[in-house]
Image (spheres, rainbow, N blue to C red):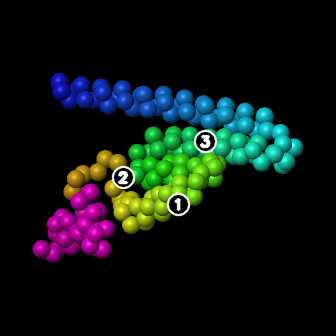
């Protein structure tokens, strides 16, 4: 009974994620069409504030699309991508103080370090056994793969 309840809750959560993703996708499509149709090229070339406003809108649409990818993919990599885009948008679009700029640059640097040195791509695969995950972690940490007893037995080794 407890397992059935968990399955129903998990299914309901997945359905909510799908509906939310569709709503965000619809908003991104409508926003993109609206952005293209309402952009005045004369103002875009001569009024910096207008260009900055359009750039901000475009960045929000891109972040929305990345958010959909994050909701549907369940990977650490997609979470880092969304965070990078959000920080980059703030740096490019907003008028911030030098201290805020420094913090944003440091944040982007930390996210790149996380992606480069702390991210293990094998862990993002779905439906894997605990043993497979442990072997992948050992392989990343120690730099070699740990072979199973079954594989050694197939080769005739102890």
* For discs 2 and 1, the disc positioned in front in the rendered view: 1
Mark 1 Cα-neighbour bin, 10 Å: few <14, some 14–19, many ≥20: few
* For discs 1 and 3, the disc positioned in front in the rendered view: 1
Examine the rendering and report whether any part of residue 113 can be seen: yes
The part of the chain drawn in magenta is 132-158
Looking at marks 2 and 1 on the same chain, the residue that comes earlier in the sequence is marked by 1
Question: Residue 28 location in percent, x, y?
Answer: 62, 35
Looking at marks 2 and 3 on the same chain, the residue that comes earlier in the sequence is marked by 3
Question: Residue 112 location in percent, x, y?
Answer: 47, 62
Membership of 136 in magenta stretch:
yes
Q: Nearer the viewer, residue 57 or 102?
A: 102
Please, what secondary structure does the residue beneath circle 3 have?
A: helix
**What residue is pinned by disc 2?**
125
**What residue is pinned by disc 3?**
60
In the shown orientation, is residue 115 left or right of residue 65?
left
In whole angstroms, how far apart are the C-alphas of marks 1 and 3?
Answer: 22 Å
Which circle marks residue 102 in the picture? 1
Q: Furthest-left residue in view? A: 158
Examine the rendering and report whether any part of residue 41 can be seen: no
- Displayed quadrant of residue 3: top left
């Amino acid at each position: 009974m407890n397992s059935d309840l968990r399955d129903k809750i998990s299914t309901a959560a997945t359905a909510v994620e799908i509906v939310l993703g569709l709503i965000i996708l619809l908003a991104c499509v409508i926003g993109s069409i609206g952005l293209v149709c309402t952009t005045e090229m004369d103002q875009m070339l001569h009024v910096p504030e207008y260009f900055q406003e359009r750039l901000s809108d475009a960045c929000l649409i891109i972040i929305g699309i990345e958010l959909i990818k994050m909701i549907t993919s369940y990977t650490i990599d997609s979470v880092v991508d969304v965070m990078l885009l959000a920080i980059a948008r703030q740096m490019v679009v907003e008028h911030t103080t030098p201290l805020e700029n420094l913090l944003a640059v440091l944040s982007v640097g930390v996210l790149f370090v996380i992606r480069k040195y702390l991210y293990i791509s094998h862990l993002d695969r779905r439906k894997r056994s605990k043993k497979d995950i442990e072997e992948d972690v050992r392989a990343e940490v120690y730099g070699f793969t740990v072979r199973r007893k079954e594989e050694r037995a197939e080769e005739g080794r102890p």
